[in-house]
Image: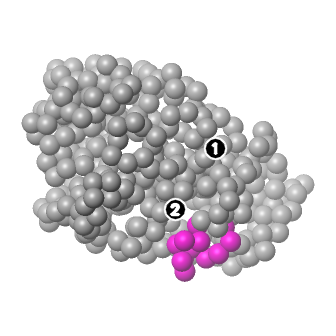
Amino acid sequence: MASTALKTALTNVRVFDGQRLTDPTTVVIDDGTIGTDANGARALDAGGAVLLPGLIDAHVHLHGTEFLDQLAARGVTTALDMANSPEQLAVLRDVPGTTSVLSAGTPVIGPGGPHSRMPGMAEDAVIHDAAHADRYVADRIAAGSDYLKIILEAPGEGGPEAATATALVEAAHARGIRVIAHAASHGAFTMALDAGADIVTHVPLGTPLDPTAVERMSSEGHISVPTLTMMEGTATARGDEKAFAGSMASVAALHRAGVPVLAGTDANTQPGVPFQVPHGTSLHHELQLLVTAGLTPAEALRAATSLPARHFGLTDRGAIAPGLRADLVLVDGDPLADIRATRALTRVWCGGIEHPVADA
C-alpha cells in the first residue's frame, strides 16, 4: 500500500454525481483531496469506467486494524463503528491509506439484556437509571465517541428503561452529538422513537413495522439503518427465512414514506451474535437488498455515500467535488443499470492514497 497520495488526473471517467453518470471527464486527486488543477499530475486513463464516491458502511463492528484493509479492498472507505473500547478505537483511527473510522465507542446497555452477557462487553457500558445519563454521555465524549449508541430491548427484557433512554438522548443532544438506537424488536423500535433517537438501526424480523411507526419515522425526522444483511442472516440462522420478508416490507414502507434509508451491514466477528456478517463484501450485498426492497440503484448508491455523510455530519466526503476527501471507487460497469456492478472494483483511493483491491 502506498503511504502518500500521488497527484493523479483520472481522465475519461464517468462520475456518479448523486443522480446520474456524467459524460467522460477528468477528476484530479491532489494531496488527499479532489482538486481542479491537473498540471503536474500523472494521467490515468479510466477508459470510460465509472467513478463513485468512496462507500460508507453505516453500521460495522471493528475488532482489529486488519478489518480496515478488508473494507478498503472492497471499496468501503469509511466505517461507522457501533461499539468499541477507547483503547482499540485509538489504534483504529487515522491510519493513512485505508478505511477511516468514526465510532460510538462504548455503547449503552441495560443491566439484564442479551448484550450484557456478550463476551468482552465493558462493565461501564451498563446504565441502571436515568440519573446517570448526563455523566454517562459526558464520559463517552471524553473517551472519544463521535456519537452515542444505545442498545434498546423490548420493555421488560433488560435494556435501558424508557426514561433512561430519553434522558440519554437529551444529554447527548445537549452536547451536540447524535444518538443511534439499536432496535431489533417492535417494542425497542417504539422506545427508540419515544426517546427521540436520531438514527434507528435494524428493522424487526417477522411482522412488518406498523403504519404508525413508519409515519412517526417520517414526520419526526428519524433515519433508518435497517442492516438487511444482518436480518437476513439472522433469519436464516434461526431456520425462519420467511421472517426476513417482514424486514424487507418494513424497508419498502419506510422508503415510500420518505424516510432516509442508509446502507449499513452490522459487519462483525463477535462471538455470540446471531450472524457474523463479513466486512466489505456485505455492503455490496446490502445495496442489492435495498434495490430489491424498492430503492432505485441511484438511491441505493446515495444510501452508501451522500446520505450517511449528511446524517452523520461528515461534510468532507460522500460526493465527488473539489475540496472533498479523495475517497474514490472506480468500477467496471454501470451500477445504475445493475447495482451488482459495484462489486467490479478496479481501483480504490482512501484519502487520495490508492489501496489494493480484492478479487471480484
Disc 2 marks which residue? Answer: 284
Q: Is residue 154 left or right of residue 245?
A: left
Residue 164 picture location, percent across and down: 17, 30
Which residue is depicted at the point 61% across and 55% down? 74
* Type of amino acid at the residue the image marks with label 1: Asp
The answer to whether residue 257 is visible is no
Q: Quadrant of the N terminus?
A: top right
| Farthest left residue in view | 156
* Type of amino acid at the residue the image marks with label 2: His
Q: Nearer the viewer, residue 120 or 86?
A: 120
Which residue is depicted at the point 76% across and 59% down? 28
Q: Residues within 10 Å of mark 2 (few under 14, many from 20)?
A: many
Tell me if residue 50 comes above or below residue 169 in the rendering. below
Residue 308 picture location, percent across and down: 45, 53
Residue stretch in magenta: 331-342
Residue 44 picture location, percent across and down: 83, 64
What secondary structure is marked by label 2? helix
In reply to whether residue 340 is colored magenta, the answer given is: yes
Q: Earlier in the sequence, mark 1 or mark 2?
A: 1
Which residue is depicted at the point 27% across and 37% down? 151
Q: Which mark is residue 150?
A: none
Disc 1 marks which residue? Answer: 69
Question: Marks 1 and 2, how far apart in space?
Answer: 16 Å
Residue 5 picture location, percent across and down: 78, 45
Q: Residues within 10 Å of mark 1 (few under 14, many from 20)?
A: many
Tell me if residue 151 comes above or below residue 37 in the rendering. above
What secondary structure is marked by label 1? helix
Q: Contact (CB < 8 A) between labels 1 and 2?
A: no
Tell me if residue 80 comes above or below residue 256 in the rendering. above
The answer to whether residue 56 is visible is yes
